[in-house]
Amino acid sequence: MRGGYRESPRLLLVEDDRELAPMLAEVLGDDYQVDIAADGQRGLHLALTHHYDAMVIDRGLPAIEGVDLVERLRARGLLTPILLLTARGSITERVEGLDAGAEDYLVKPFEIDELLARIRALLRRHPDTSAVLPVGTRSLQLDARTVVGEQATPVQLSASEAELLAVLARRPDKVFTRPELLATVFDPADVAGTVDTYVYYLRRKLGRRAIRTVYGVGYQLGTL
Ligand code: CA
């Protein structure tokens, strides 16, 4: 919500089909703000670093396969409702998708109207997917990239800083390795020092203890 009117819900579409993806994005674009990821790695990055109200994920994807992607998102504490698209409708495939943490599935080929109805149902069932992540005693507002707290002045973060903090904050119990953070938040091809640089920036803005260094392993959300 900004400026007193309600923005349309945000959807992430993870689909590698070069004809289907833009076609779906166009149709969905009437009712939603849609981001497209053409492979699982990009999908993981966008899902963990931006706020979405729902996600539509194809099962067969390059880089990270659809069911694996759903599992990874759930393992990182992401609760956003997910609709999985599957090419085959065998019981095993459906069960795998639901077991991985998807709320619903739709078998290809499908009618657009059915997809739209399923997405509306997902959004009704999960009306309060939050754009706000708790970080210690404060919270990160994903859309505004701002850390706010009752006792603290709001802190504005850059896109990369907010993305790094979001990934750490979704799993406060987990120690992330540098390669993990590099692959999730940044470009896997970036130099390893990128992670350290952004940890430094975040500590400068939020305090030294905001991120904990676990020697020989990596980084974890600290205390704010
Ligand atoms: Ca596919």
Image (cartoon, grey):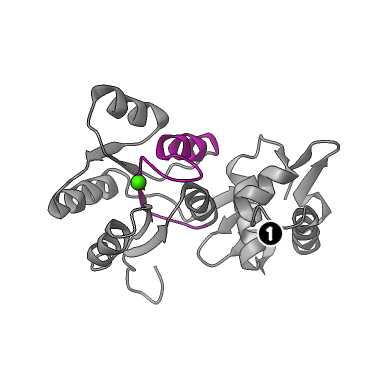
Give the image location of residue 212, x and y in percent.
79, 44
Given residues 176 and 162, the one toward you in this image is 176
Q: Secondary structure at mark 1?
A: loop
Give the image location of residue 170, x and y in percent: 58, 44
Is residue 149 at all visible to an observer of this figure?
no
Where residue 29 sits, quadrant-wise, is bottom left
The residue where tag 1 is placed is 151
Q: Percent position (x, y) of residue 53? A: 37, 53
Q: Quadrant of residue 146?
A: bottom right
Residue 218 lies, in percent from the top left, at 78, 41
Q: Is 13 one of the magenta-colored residues? A: no
The 10 Å Cα crowd at callout 1, few under 14, some 14 to 19, many 20 or more, is few
The one nearer the camera, 110 or 127, is: 110
In reply to whether residue 75 is colored magenta, the answer given is yes
Note whether ligand 1 is within 8 Å of mark 1: no
Looking at the picture, does residue 107 appear above or below residue 202?
A: above
Residue occupying image coordinates x 44% and y 41%: 79
For residue 172, which quarter of the picture?
A: top right
Q: Which residues are magenta?
A: 50-76
